Amino acid sequence: MKILFIGVGKMGLPMSGHLLKQGHEVRVQDPDSSRLVEAKASGLEIGDQSLDSIEDFQWADYVFSSLPNDKAFLEVANLVAKKASKNTRYVDTSTISIGASASAAELLKQAGIEYLRVAVSGNNHMAAAANLTILASGPKEIYDEAQPLLSSWGASQFYLGDQEQARLMKLVVNLLIAQTSAMLAEGLTLGRLGNLDWQDMWQVLSASAVGSPILKAKSAQLGMPLGSRDFSPTFTVHQMIKDLELITSAGDDLGASLTQTKTTLGWMNQAIAQGDGLLDYAAIIRVLERQVGIKDLS
C-alpha cells in the first residue's frame, strides 16, 4: 500500500514505522522539522511539508493521521476531503472530541472519502513495542480491509460500530486511567500520613486485588524496587488535562455528571499551578500530599 502519514510525534513515528516494516511505502508529513529528521533516520520518506501540494494526497491509497487536538484534526480532514482521490481511505488515530470527528465524517462523506476512526490505547513505549490496543469504528468493510495494517500496532483489536463509538470508548478508557491516578493519590497520601513506607505500599498494591496493569506500570515507573519517586512522564499532566476536558465535555453532552472525574481535573489543574505540569500525570499524588502538609516530595 501507499500510505501518507500526517503527524509523526511520539505516537505517529512508531506507528508509521511499523507500517513501513510491513513492506508498505510510507510518506510522512509534519510541521515540526525535528520530527522529520528522526523520521528520515527511521527510513521514512518525507512528503510535502507545506501541505499545499495535491500530489501526496493523490498518491496515497491510505491517509493516516496522528494529531494533537480538534483544530489540527479538522484542518487535516478538510485537506483530505479536498485533495485525496475518491478511492482513498482516511484513518485518523488522534484523541479528539466526538463532535469534531462527527463533523469531519460528514465533510468526508460529501467528498466521497471513506473514513475510519481508530483510537489507540497505550503510551509511546507501547506504540514502539507494537503493543497498542486498537479501538475502531466506521464502515465495517473499511475496517476489515484496513485490519492487516492496524495489526502492525498491536494484537488487541476491537470493532465497536459504524459511527463515533471508537472515540467514546477511548474517552471511557482514559477516564478510568485518570481515576486510577486519583485513587492512588488519595490512598498513598493516607498511607504516608500513617507512616507507611512508600516502597512497602507499592509492593502491597501491586500484589493485591487492585494491582491492575496500569497500577503495575506506574509501580515500575515510580521505581518501586528502589523506593524512588520518579515522576518522569510517559503522559504529562498537560496531556491528561486535554483528555479530561474531552471526557467531561462528552459527559455534559450525554447527560453524565462525572463528579469524581471533574474533581480529578481540578487536581490536574492544581498540579500545573504548582509547577508540575510537565511531570507524569501521576504527579497529582504530590498535589494531595501538599494539601495535607507532607513536605518530603522528593
Image: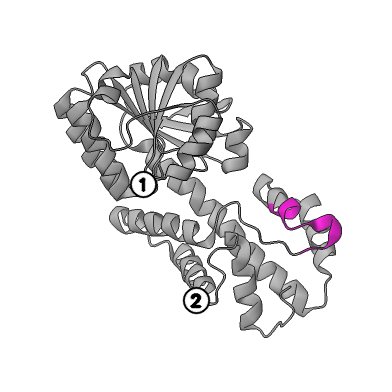
Residue sitting at 35 percent across and 19 percent down?
Answer: 142
Residue 138 image offset from top left, x and y in percent:
33, 28
* Image quadrant in which you'd find residue 224: bottom right
**Residue 195, image x and y in percent?**
82, 77
Residue at the image position 65 percent from the left and 58 percent from the top = 232
Q: What secondary structure is found at the residue carrying circle 1?
A: loop
Instruction: Quickly name the residue at label 2.
Output: 273
Nearest the eye: 129 or 27? 27
Q: Quadrant of the N terminus?
A: top left
Q: Residue furthest bottom?
A: 293
Q: Mark 2 to mark 1: distance in Å?
A: 25 Å
| Relative to 53, residue 297 above or below | below
Q: Amino acid at mark 2?
A: Ala
Circle 1: residue type:
Ile
Q: Residues within 10 Å of mark 2 (few under 14, many from 20)?
A: few
Residue 220 on the magenta span: yes
Seen in the picture, residue 201 relative to 206 is either above or below; the reply is below
Rendered position, 181 above or below 285: above
Q: Is residue 117 visible?
A: no
Q: Image check: 65 left or right of 42?
A: left
Q: Give the residue displayed 47% in from the left and 71% down from the top.
A: 269
Instruction: Provide the residue designation for mark 1.
Output: 96
Residue range of the region highlighted in magenta in the rendering: 218-228
Q: Is residue 89 visible?
A: yes
Q: Main secondary structure of the magenta part?
A: helix
Which residue lies most toward the left here?
Answer: 110
